[in-house]
Image (cartoon, rainbow, N blue to C red):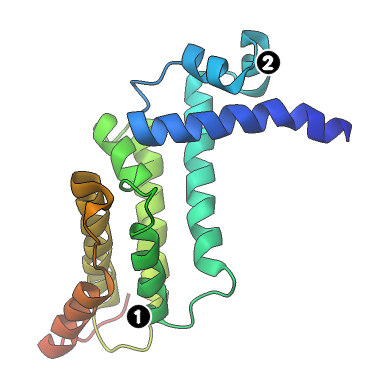
Amino acid sequence: MEAQKQSEPRNRILEVADRLFYAEGVRATGTEKIMSMAEVAKATFYRHFESKDALVVTYLAHRDQALWDYLSQPTAPKNLREALTKFEQYANWPEVIGCPFLRIASEYPDTAHPFHRLAIQHQNKIVDYLIELLEPFAIEKRAAAVAILSVIDGALSLRMLYGSSKAVSILSPAEAVLKSFQSAGVEGGR
């Protein structure tokens, strides 16, 4: 019970930061606003997060884990089509307004910045995941995975542009990309 009470302010801070960072951006969201909305004192905030940067890193780790949890629930996709269907369903949730990692990368365009590096790591994990799903195909898997990730990122960018007024497609364009790799007869490994 005591551990739950102790983590409650941390969870509130993270929930508020998640909402604000995603909707308004990291640079536009001050710690004072987060503390106010989370109803925590400054000392409580800094007991749980040594800085705003530490909170952003935790936010990104939380967003990364949430994606992998979503993809694996209730069971992990058995093939590329199932995974792409899940990505498409996610991209069309009303609360999705783009990729949080692409949003961070656009706010911090210096590729050496720690937040931008975390965005790159996240994207690389997705490429690796897609490569595994492309195993049955006799194509250049890394190039195909990157092209399919471009479709996913493009759909999420369209959500950022149009909001939920327009459904975005991932499965059909990604399958077209896969078919183009298969038609080209490009053989290769990872």
Q: Are marks 2 and 1 in contact (CB under 8 Å)?
A: no
Q: Which residue corresponds to mark 2?
A: 44
Residue at figure coordinates x 72%, y 30% from the top left: 8
The amino acid type, in three-letter code, at marker 2 is: Thr
Q: Is residue 39 above or below residue 167?
A: above
Q: Position of residue 27 (x, y in %)?
A: 34, 22
Q: Badge 2: how crowded within 10 Å, few (<14), some, or many (20+)?
A: some
The number of callouts visible is 2
Callout 1 crowding tier (Cα within 10 Å): few <14, some 14–19, many ≥20: many
Element type at mark 2: helix
Q: Position of residue 26 (x, y in %)?
A: 37, 26
Front residue of this view, candidates 136 and 52: 52
The structure residue drawn at horizontal position 25% and vertical position 51%, both measured from the top left corner, is 159
**Can you say whether 29 is above or below 113 in the image?**
above
Q: Amino acid at mark 1?
A: Leu
Q: Is residue 100 left or right of residue 16?
A: left
> For residue 134, which numbered disc appears in the image?
1
Rendered position, 94 above or below 131: above
